[in-house]
Image (cartoon, helix red, strand yellow):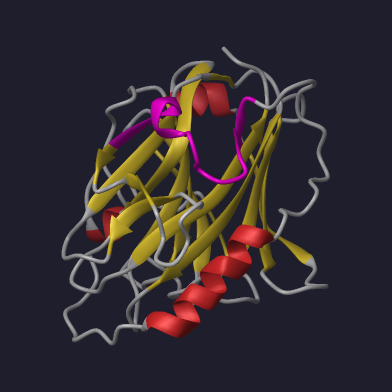
Amino acid sequence: MSSSRFSRIIRGGLTTVLALGIAATAAPAGALAAGDGNPLVDFPSFNGASRMLDRNGTADIIIPAGQRHQRILRLTTGGFRQAGSAWAKPKIDLSQSFESTFKVYLHHSDPGADGIAFLVQTEGPRALGGWGGGLGYRGIKRSVAVEFDTFQNSPDPNNNHLAVVLDGNPDVHTAVGTPSMPLYGRPFYARVAYDAPAKTLSVYVKAFRAGSPEQLVLQQPIDLATAAGGSSAWIGFTAGTGTELSKQDIYSWSVQGAEA
């Protein structure tokens, strides 16, 4: 849970310029060939995505300011003690390799909290966990989370880290990595790749700047089907705020993998 201090809101012009840039830029190409044919999830923006996503808590599809033709997935709205989750309706086969790529913008206050997580979980499309340091997934026990954490709570190494977390317990990190770029205040790309034959999960990030290299931040041996409690799983995002706040947005999302 984030501590209580007054927030400074990032206002109008800069936020709008960044958002327009995010919407216009393509995601980086992935290195892992995961699945053939059409993607399992394909949201270059979230236009028309309402019927394809189960949304809980504060999560919703919104129109950003000044962007009439753009939709984004906003997981938290910058309010006190919020939690949101969103799950793709097609379930994924965790016995097969997959790759998930998404564009993220975590912003609004300084400092911001608490972050987002990409999850595979077998509890269902209404799954929603705790606010604050729970990042919206605390208590989703049959899950594997990759968290993008922007606030240092007591179990955390710092306020800018990634972690692999099992059993819906963000107080225990199976693996931790710190990127060389900030996760908060600037948009970035993320790529989560699972190699099923090797049973290895790899997590990459890339700054939203031309020519920025993609960074491998985490690589963890794991059998996702065993860890999540089944080979047929829901995939999606969670986020939380505490007394420090954030608007936590996903601008695009694609998944190459096999439908369960």
Q: Quadrant of residue 2?
A: bottom left
Residue 139 visible from this viewpoint: no
**Is residue 45 located in the magenta-colored stretch of the structure?**
yes
**Is residue 259 located in the magenta-colored stretch of the structure?**
no
Establish if 31 lies above or below 229: below
Q: In the rendered view, does 91 fall on the left or right side of 39?
A: left
Residue 89 x, y percent position in the rendering: 45, 22
Q: Residue at x 48, y 16 (%)?
A: 230
Q: In the rendered view, does 28 fall on the left or right side of 147?
A: right
Establish if 153 lies above or below 141: below
Q: Quadrant of residue 22?
A: bottom right
Residue 181 x, y percent position in the rendering: 62, 76
Q: What span is in magenta?
A: 40-55
Q: Residue at x 16, y 79 (%)?
A: 4
Q: Residue at x 66, y 18 (%)?
A: 258
* Residue nearer the viewer, 251 or 221: 251
Establish if 203 lies above or below 257: below
Residue 251 x, y percent position in the rendering: 53, 53
Residue 172 x, y percent position in the rendering: 38, 52
Q: Quadrant of the N terminus?
A: bottom left
Q: In the rendered view, does 38 fall on the left or right side of 32?
A: left
Residue 36 visible from this viewpoint: yes
Determine the residue located farthest toward the top in the rendered image.
260
Q: Quadrant of residue 212?
A: bottom right
